[in-house]
Image: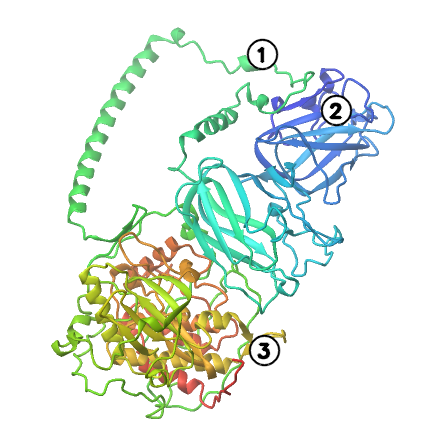
Amino acid sequence: MENGEIPDEDISASSMYDPSLGPKHARLRQDKGGGAWCPKNMVTKEGKEYLEVNLHSPRILTSTRTQGRFGNGQGVEYTEEYFVEYWRPGFNKWVRWRNRRGMELLAGNNNPYSEKEQVFDPAIVATKVRFIPYTSHMRIVCIRVELYGCPWTDGLVSYSMPQGIKRGSEVDLSDRTYDGREEGGYLSGGLGQLVDGQKGPDNFRLDVSGNGKGYEWVGWRNDTPSMLGRPVEITFEFDYSRNFTAIHLHMNNYFTKDVQVFSYAKVYLGTGGNQFNGEPVHFSYIPDLVLEQARDVTIKLHSRAGRFLKLQLYFAARWIMLSEVIFESVISEWNNTDDEEPRNKSAIVLATGSPYQNNEGPLQRDEVKATFNKEENNDNALPDKTKEPESKQFVGLVIGILTTVIVMLLAAIMFIFYRNRRLKAALAPSTFYDQHGDLKVSVQEEGEDKGPICPPLPAQYHPAACTMTTPQLHKTITDYSGITEVQPVIPLLLSTAINLARPIPPVQEYPSNPPPIPPPPEKYYASTEICKNSLPPLPPSPTPSTPPPMSAKASSSMTSYSPEDMLTEEEDEVPECILDFPREKLNIVENLGCGYFGDVHICEVDRFPGYDEVFRNTSSDLVIVKSLRPGSLDALRIEFQQEAKRLARLADRNVARLLGASLEDDPMCIVSENGEYGDLNQYLQSHIAETSTVHTAKTLSFGTLVYMATQIASGMKHLEEMDFVHRDLATRNCLVSRGYTVKVSDLGSGRNAYAADYFRVEGRPLLPIRWMAWESMLMGRHTSKSDVWSFAVTLWEILTFAREQPFEELSDHRIVENATYFYQEDDRRIILPLPKNCPKDIYELMRECWHRNDVDRPNFREIHMFLQRKNLGYKHVDSNDT
């Protein structure tokens, strides 16, 4: 108002005393005209007079200031109290603002010259605002105002959902600041506490802000009539069709009071109010019964587009409590549908200052517009060109001809340039993959100039938007095979809070040579043969610098460099050492998901002859069963049989053992041992650091974490010796048993609980790109050295208790972009940050595993020796409560 950003024509009023006291003079600290806006009639308690400010586009208003009429010392009128009403598209009436305690009346001035500020808490999202003077006794009032705020860039128009309910007599979990309609316990057409920027505390029963217990939370109970057997459903409407990267939900997890984060969520996107086409985004949340802190839960939406978003939250306990919802999105340039054209056109009309722009809201019959000075507009009229001298017209003709010639020359040059570029493109190497034309990466041969190979990304993925520090990678090669003195174990202090949006701290430059280590005892881990007959000699392992050609087939489990070459003619038949497992003894307990070959289940096994011998060295009565889809093609059946033969050759204490298979009749299945305590990812999340101040949760010491990592390195060393490449090493694919025993396994990429860990590419298997080496991602080159890269990411997961996904802050597109930086040897490439209080030599090992050149990375024998030496002296205690 004061600086003139809001023009006179956007300030109107119900009436005015005279033109010198009209609405255009209601600007703070301005004494033009009569010095303020004064209504024609005296103000009473009824509050019929108003001053209106039209903002056109949605703004979020945080405060206001008012003054009376000073009038160069002649004015004595001011407004003691006033109301504020606001309007935005979608409203059917003006809404009166009230604070968090329900009070509507704002204190004004007590003299005509001083300023009085009032803060809007909660803030107002509006396109129009009205100031309505109020007085307890009839009097003449005048007012000058100023508004403070910023554009509402989130694009959220409204959300609709069931109203929250009370919990007992004291805790009110309803949305008390919602400004839309409420009919029959259902909210629609407004905004409220879910987008007010205030996050609720861990304990919802505390009155932190003085607004009442549970004020910052909106809660629903699963046994209310409207929620019985149904999820909580919230529909969000946006201004235009937008590309959504993620949605962040601040959830309560006070599980001792029957409150938990949702167990499952679905996100639908559509262009119409009730039209949601296509498959929803599915998200599963692993229950946390250890930490009761409230937390941000992120659901990645992978640039899905829509103007309406429907969120369904399924109950994991009796209560669901939600405090804040934040979206990451940008306006879509390609996905605006036909039904949005009227909205877009109306927005353009408003931006151009059409005379109809003030008709977007309900009007009063006696509404008075600000007056215009028509004579001032005539000053900007264009001169009559017919009166110009003829010489000027001739010069204009010459300039026009020259401009035409220049444009034609430029067009010819562009045509030649475009044709040459087309010829070069025809000779360019083929692309790695193409997902709906959205992501396309081309990799050049070694020795060629490494130019940009990643296409321009949307604005939210631009490197400039990333605030993370980029650690510089070492170019040195570290020798882990030496012998030196014992290094003491450094305790690990981990924060138990989960922060999904934390900035990555700068990484210090540590010495590039971690302490060498002595060789381990010869029989640190015993290996036993599972086949009595001797195996044929293995072919020599290919060197990492010249990997052999990759098979076109993709397996859901561990695969060798060339599986076909490792099977001799004698092995084409099912080896005698593979037990023909009786399928009829398997009873399904849980469906883990769908893998490359088919469904993956956890099953119970009924006793059968030879049961004790088969399960002699296993710690769990449950088994993992991978089945082949009935009716699969012969090629897939052969590949499934070869998968069983390859797994039968593995014999190591830290590799999950093949128990048997049924490979004759449909449905074929492979039976592997399971861990007594499930996978390592869930196991870590159910524990906290030993040094934590939380005494009710299970803890793990730093020595135990390193002990588990050492076992994974031991299992991977065995695979490396057998020329096997895992391709999907992560904590989710490691099994935990009694005594902190960890075994490398592969439960498949189709598990619902870990769907967000994989990147879907049309026509290709799911890719765990956050764990993959850059050469595997871009070139499809998988070696033991690419498994070394994945091991370092797995070690990072272990030291952070798997509390967050690697590179949680980055979208999948940014992960691929970062891989191209490694290919180009670009300094913008980034690696995972230093885990909190992680010893520098452990982190240095990770950094060595993330070298750009695979020949510079250590092998698993060196990694295993280093970790074994690092944890020398550690003794674990077998416990039933692991």
- Front residue of this view, candidates 283 and 830: 283
Disc 1 marks a residue whose amino acid type is Glu
Q: Earlier in the sequence, mark 2 or mark 3?
A: 2
Could you say which quadrant of the image residue 262 lies in? bottom right
Disc 2 marks a residue whose amino acid type is Gly
Picture disc at residue 691? 3
Tell me: 201 left or right of 510: right
- Front residue of this view, candidates 163 and 692: 163
Q: Is residue 331 above or below residue 33?
A: below
Disc 3 marks a residue whose amino acid type is Thr
Residue holding disc 2: 35
Q: Which is in the foreground here, disc 2 or disc 3?
A: 3
Residue holding disc 1: 375
Q: Quadrant of the N terminus?
A: top right
Tell me: 186 left or right of 778: right
Tell me: 470 left or right of 823: right
Could you say which quadrant of the image residue 444 lies in? bottom left
- Render colour scheme: rainbow
Q: Is residue 604 above or below residue 753?
A: below
The CA distance from mark 2 to mark 3 is: 67 Å
Asked whether disc 3 touches disc 1, contact meaning CB atoms under 8 Å apart, the reply is no
Question: How many labels sit on residues?
Answer: 3
The CA distance from mark 3 to mark 1 is: 78 Å
Q: Secondary structure at mark 2?
A: loop
Q: Secondary structure at mark 3?
A: loop
* Residue 456 pos. (x, y %): 34, 47
Q: Secondary structure at mark 1?
A: helix
- Front residue of this view, candidates 35 and 122: 122
Q: Can residue 474 be seen in this snapshot?
A: no
Crowdedness of circle 3 by 10 Å Cα count: few (<14), some, many (20+)?
A: some
Q: Is residue 468 above or below residue 673?
A: above
Q: Earlier in the sequence, mark 3 or mark 1?
A: 1
